[in-house]
């Protein structure tokens, strides 16, 4: 059903852009939105073209309109292309992590979108930071927010539910961590884990530890996690705004363990995750204090099981691997919808300096968020 138009402003009532609903990811608004002027019977005439000058190897999209049709998008009159001859006539040019120049003059109404899949520490600065209209990334304030996952309650009033099982049964081991990147992390996660290891059993699997868990047998590793361990270190490689990945959503919450998180601020986890489903390292003054609390949970099944009462109260929007979550049907559908929204395209927004948005002060830190917030408060 097409969206309604406001009598006061003359534009659609739905809030789709970051400045229209600050603090919200607007994902559901964008998923359900059908532009007032959209006419599916004129599909060929109103088709929007998205040109991609660079294709990451892990993107699985078809370069026609089938991606949108097969995803059953409410608005599906869009098509992808990689044909350089179509760049000049495309409605949107979509870049991935880096900006690629063209010798051709840019049409005045053509939009540029930058897709960021990695945190700022792993993305280059742009030499034309004022060229971008839209952003697509895991951040809430992206034009199109594409987090690794999103939790929705069936009924917002019911956030806890008694469970009919003991998640601690037969578990004899304490903390596990699957990790292979030992030097690329910017937040000192390995050092924190090593310090935690002095006070509680922490089994580190992969290149950074002494235990092995082969990538080609991941299900066996996860089954071991479910059966033997009570806690899992869902540590990101960067402490960055809104950056929470499959380490938390897949390996953490989808398994019968309590994830211990490091990465985004606690308030971000509160937005993305079910109530009382994780433990944030910043709730504790030191790794030892965290270990002391984990020992308490280990010895108290009722308290341990209280971290699983979120189960059965809702569901995750995205399914599958992390890459598919970022590039799934929701993202494609919302991208097409936004291209057909006259208010979003007729008066294009520009990032005055995308480098500042992506790499500016406070986007990422190398310390704890509580230290930054304490300084700002003072």
Image (cartoon, rainbow, N blue to C red):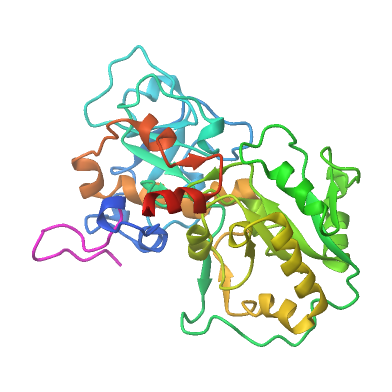
Image point (56%, 43%), residue name: 367
Compared with 163, 124 (above or below) is above
Please identify the dominant SS of the magenta region: loop
Inspect this view and state whether residue 257 appears.
no
Number of numbered discs overlaid on the protein picture: 0
Query: Is 314 included in the stretch rendered in magenta?
Result: no
257 left or right of 48?
right
Name which quarter of the figure residue 79 lies in.
top left
Q: Position of residue 37 (x, y in %)?
A: 22, 55
Start and end of the magenta stretch?
1-17
Image point (61%, 77%), residue name: 310
Compared with 124, 221 (above or below) is below
Check the image and name the residue furthest to the top.
Answer: 103
Pick whichever, 156 or 37, lies toward us. Answer: 156
Pick whichever, 60 or 76, lies toward us. Answer: 60
167 left or right of 40?
right
State the quadrant of the N terminus.
bottom left
Inspect this view and state whether residue 131 appears.
yes
Check the image and name the residue furthest to the front.
Answer: 378
Pick whichever, 89 or 29, lies toward us. Answer: 29
Check the image and name the residue furthest to the left.
Answer: 8
244 left or right of 257?
left
Query: Is 10 included in the stretch rendered in magenta?
Result: yes
Q: Position of residue 362 (x, y in %)?
A: 43, 42
Image point (79%, 81%), residue name: 301
Q: Position of residue 268 (x, y in %)?
A: 49, 58
Pick whichever, 378 or 334, lies toward us. Answer: 378
Q: Position of residue 17 (x, y in %)?
A: 30, 52
């Amino acid at each position: 059903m097409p969206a309604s138009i406001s009598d006061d402003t003359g534009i659609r009532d739905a809030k789709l852009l970051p400045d229209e609903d600050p603090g919200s990811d607007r994902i559901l608004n964008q998923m359900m939105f059908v532009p007032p002027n959209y006419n599916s019977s004129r599909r060929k005439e109103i088709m929007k073209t998205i040109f991609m000058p660079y294709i990451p190897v892990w993107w699985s999209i078809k370069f026609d309109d089938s991606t949108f049709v097969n995803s059953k998008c409410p608005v599906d009159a869009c098509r992808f292309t990689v044909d350089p001859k179509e760049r000049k006539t495309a409605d949107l040019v979509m870049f991935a992590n880096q900006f690629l120049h063209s010798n051709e003059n840019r049409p005045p109404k053509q939009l540029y979108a930058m897709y960021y899949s990695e945190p700022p520490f792993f993305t280059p600065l742009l030499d034309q930071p004022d060229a971008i209209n839209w952003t697509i990334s895991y951040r809430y304030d992206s034009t199109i927010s594409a987090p690794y996952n999103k939790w929705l309650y069936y009924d917002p009033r019911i956030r806890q539910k008694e469970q009919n099982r003991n998640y601690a049964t037969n578990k004899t081991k304490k903390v596990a961590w699957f990790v292979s990147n030992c030097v690329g992390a910017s937040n000192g996660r390995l050092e924190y884990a090593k310090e935690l290891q002095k006070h509680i059993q922490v089994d580190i699997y992969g290149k950074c530890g002494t235990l092995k868990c082969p990538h080609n047998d991941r299900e066996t590793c996860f089954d071991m996690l479910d059966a033997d361990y009570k806690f899992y270190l869902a540590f990101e490689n960067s402490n960055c705004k809104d950056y929470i990945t499959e380490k938390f959503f897949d390996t953490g919450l989808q398994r019968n363990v309590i994830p211990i998180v490091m990465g985004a601020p606690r308030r971000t986890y509160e937005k993305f995750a079910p109530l009382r489903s994780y433990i944030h390292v910043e709730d504790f003054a030191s790794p030892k204090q965290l270990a002391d609390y984990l020992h308490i949970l280990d010895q108290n099944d009722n308290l341990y099981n209280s971290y699983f009462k979120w189960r059965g109260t809702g569901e995750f929007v995205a399914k599958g691997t992390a890459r598919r979550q970022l590039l799934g049907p929701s993202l494609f559908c919302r991208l097409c919808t936004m291209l057909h929204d006259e208010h979003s395209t007729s008066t294009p927004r520009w990032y005055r300096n995308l480098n500042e948005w992506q790499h500016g002060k406070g986007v990422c830190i190398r310390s704890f968020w509580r230290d930054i917030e304490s300084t700002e408060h003072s």
